Each structure stands twice: as C-alpha cells, then as structure tokens.
Amino acid sequence: MPIPNEQREYTFEDYLNWPEDERWEIIDGIAYCQATPSPVHQNISMNLSRILSNYFLDKECKVFAAPFTVRLPMKEGQTDEKKNNRIVKPDLSVICDKGRLDKNGYSGAPTLIVEIVSRSSAKKDNIIKVSKYEQAGVKEYWIVTPETETIMSYVLDEHGEFPRPEMYVLGEDEEIVSKVFTDLTIKLENIFETWI
C-alpha cells in the first residue's frame, strides 16, 4: 500500500504496509509524517538515551529510542489489534512490562515517554499527544523543547489525569526529578549539552 495520501481513517493494519524507511504516526486514525530530526534534536536524544539507559541498567524497565513503535491502548470495546488507530513513535519510551513487547514494538502505555519538540511537531507534542498519553495511562510525559531549553513534566494523578505540568528551565533549575522513578535525577545541563 502506498503512503497515506487520502482522507480516511488509518489503522495499524495500514501502518504495517507503509515503507519502513519513512516515519509515520497514526493518532485517532489521522496519519502524521515525522520530520527528519535536526542535529540538536539528535544530540539531546542521545544525551537522554545514555543517561536513562545507564539509570535503568540492571532494573526491570528498559529504554527504547526512536524509531520505536508504540501501539497505545485501543478504545474501550475494541479488540482487533489491526484496527488500532493510535500508533506513535516517541523519541524515548521507558517500558516496564516486557510481556507487551513483540516484533512490531510495544502494545500498551509506556511508563515514561519523552518527546523532543521541533517546529513541525510542537502542536502534536504539546496538545494532541498530551491528551492521548493521558487517556492511554502514560504515568509520566516529558516534553523537551531545545529552542527554549525547557522541559515540561506531566505526571498522571490518582484520577488518571495530567494536572498542570511542572516546568524545568536550564539556568533557573539545575535538575529534573522524575515523580515516577523517584531516585532518577538528571542535571539539565547534561540534557541540553550539544555541539551545535
């Protein structure tokens, strides 16, 4: 099947037939093409990948970096995985339930998701995905914005909702502390340190 070019609802079944060298997401049936990451984006992604991978060494959870496919939980009443219309490729996913891993990625809600914002993904990361990750039950969601050197941290509350996020700013805050992995503390300068 060719890449999406028509107005209709897409599903995981469609996604499996698209070219592997292109990065697509499907959110509520709408296909979104992901832009090629910038060098700054990649630098920050590698910094966080290294820090998180070291933290989770010898622990139950593991870190997966993009391109890694996550099939978010389907709407209530849906059972056919091929009809799932919530397929995302977060920049970083922390997975704590290895039983949900398969050859196509992960089926379920990662415990922690990190998205690194680009101009083309800002609306999707800051509005659409906040809602979808909240609905899916992602426990913690970090939005990293290279341009402003900030991180917004959303943490799922006891009602299954993301209340107002905490903002971390390089130069004002020294570190970000995970609310889910309470002994995970990262210096912001180590996240935003780049060659560019």
Image (spheres, rainbow, N blue to C red):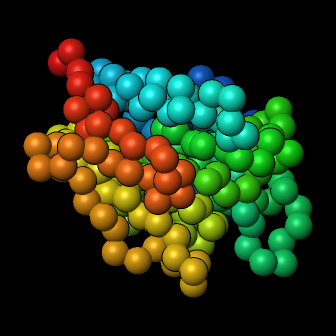
Image coordinates for residue 104, horizontal then vertical, percent? 78, 36
Image coordinates for residue 18, horizontal then vertical, percent? 68, 35
In the image, what residue occupies the spot 36% across and 39% down? 186
Classify residue 14 as left or right of residue 27: right
Quarter of the N terminus within the rendering: top right
In the image, what residue occupies the spot 46% across and 44% down? 184
The single residue placed furthest to the top in the displayed view is 195
Query: In the image shown, does 166 or 81 lie closer to the viewer?
Result: 166
Classify residue 96 as left or right of residue 114: right
Image coordinates for residue 51, horizontal then vertical, percent? 45, 29
Classify residue 20 as left or right of residue 77: left
Query: In the image shown, does 76 or 29 lie closer to the viewer?
Result: 76
Question: Quadrant of residue 170 in the image?
Answer: top left
Question: Quadrant of residue 164 in the image?
Answer: bottom left
Question: Quadrant of residue 98 in the image?
Answer: top right
In the image, what residue occupies the spot 53% across and 26% down? 54
The answer to whether residue 189 shows anywhere in this view is: yes
The single residue placed furthest to the left in the displayed view is 171
Query: In the image shown, does 154 or 70 lie closer to the viewer?
Result: 154
